Amino acid sequence: MKNLIFIALFVFFIPFQKAIACTCIGYPSISQAFSAADAVIIGYVKKTEPEKYKDSGSQVAYVKVEKAFKGYEEDEIILHQPGGSCSPTYSVGDKLLIYVNRVENEKTWEVFGCGRHSRLEDANDDLMYLNALPESAKRTRISGTIRHYEDTPEKGFSLIKYVGGVKVKIIGEKKSWDVFTDGNGVYEIYDIPSDKYKIEPEIPDGMKIRFAIWFGPFDFSLKANSCVGTDFVFSANNNLRGKVLGADGQPIPHACLNLIPADISAAKVDSYFRIFGCTKKAGSYELKEMPPGKYLIVVNKDGKMSGTEPFPTTYYPGVFEKERAVAITIGQGESFDRLDIHIPSQVETVILQGVLTYSDGRPAAREAVQFKALQKETNRDLNASNLTDDEGRFSLPILKGTKGALSGSIYLYEGRFINCPAVEKLLEGKGERGFDLTTSAIEIDGENDVKGVKLTFPFPYCAKNKND
């Protein structure tokens, strides 16, 4: 992960803001956050207006101040949170460490998004620094927290524990140090020289680094009287692998699998819990990042038959009935191979194969080809689509007997190609900055395999902009 590119999806870092459509570029160190804030406070939320936060709306939170490290002397602070995807929101009873700023033109207090605000129980790294003030502000410091998180079936992505006793290597260009996490999962080291550093934890058996969040300056260099650091999230290093094989014993590519808890009712499974994967060309699959537990492996979970999944919902090792499925129990750090799923029976398919080219005959690589069926069925997905390979070739399976039309498609927009008058003319003719252009369609009766199809865009090959 690039340092300081932080996607605010991970709720323990930004625990009070919505986790949808919020992107934070940069994550401040503790010293940076302290310096930038007008006030730094420990408190708990007494009241909110509205009582329950509503999407995209503003919120007022009344916070009882228990301790102020900086900039505030009253017993209560009122936060006016403007709403929006990155604005933190609060609930009554939340006990907080907040870095607060005064919005002068409105004469209100606000906790900005993408900061270090957190629930108090998750603020141990910050509190170690803040409680050591003013001396801590006069020293160099590298720190961070190691946590164990899992995508649990009942709670979704949630904290399992803080990981203590982990050795962390602080690697500078001239010298390195070893430190260990404490019972709260925090490591820290003071008074090391100004330098650029890497931070590498030793990974306990049966675990892996799920992701890391770097904080501090963009070049991750430690200056005098400053902080840098990295928080790490560990998860169980579990994997399930195998193949999906058709009724004829041949591998089935592009079939998709889900892992579902075997001993938890569907009503109790968190809506965000999803362990998912699709088979590759040779029919192989891998499911990973599941917490320890007992699971069923299911292919084509929604039961809709299609060209890539011409069979109903199927469970490992190859049964249509859930009651006959074999559950897999996996512990921390365990992996299982050769969990092959044999589809008992399937409906017939036909293959549509050919090449997509530009008008000068050159292949249109990595562009879309789609088949659109004339009819619709509620229990079958009759349409199909895929991207061409580097030679412009495509292969689409569809359910036998499905009538429809086959065409290629490309999205044209200003700047996609370098010096391409033909595309510029097409854009001018449409009078739009961008649009989908499709080739002439070929009618398909769906009764037999179709090979050697040639689909052609009405303009010659042009070099693509490197940003495309």
Image (cartoon, rainbow, N blue to C red):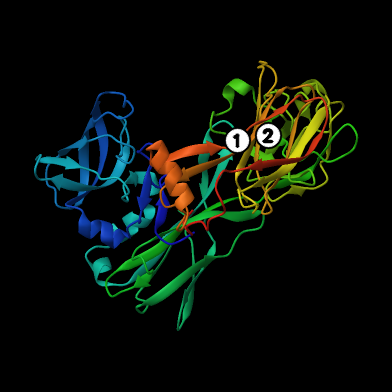
Kind of residue indicated by mark 1? Arg
Residue for point 32% across, 41% down: 86
Q: Which residue is mark 2?
A: 258
Q: Is residue 10 visible?
A: no
**CA distance separating discs 1 and 2:** 7 Å
| Left or right, residue 152 beside residue 229 | right
Q: Residues within 10 Å of mark 1 (few under 14, many from 20)?
A: some
Left or right for 290, reference 75: right
Badge 2 marks a residue whose secondary structure is: strand
Q: Provide residue 258's location: percent of width, then percent of height.
A: 68, 34
First along the sequence among labels 1 and 2:
2
**Quick one: 24 or 211, which is closer to the camera?**
24
Where disc 1 sits, the SS reads loop
Type of amino acid at the residue the image marks with label 2: Asn
- Is residue 437 or residue 261 the one in the foreground? 437
Q: Locate residue 76, reporting x and y percent.
A: 16, 37
In the displayed structure, does residue 196 sit left or right of residue 53?
Answer: right
Residue at (87, 27) in percent of width and height: 344
Q: Is residue 224 left or right of residue 78?
A: right
Task: Give neighbour class at mark 2: few <14, some 14-19, many 20+ (Cα, 10 Å).
Answer: some
Residue 380 locus on image (x, y percent): 70, 20
Location of residue 140 with respect to 438 vertically, above or below = below
- Asked whether disc 1 touches disc 2, contact meaning CB atoms under 8 Å apart, the reply is yes
Position of residue 162 measured from the top left corner of the image (x, y, whole percent): 50, 50
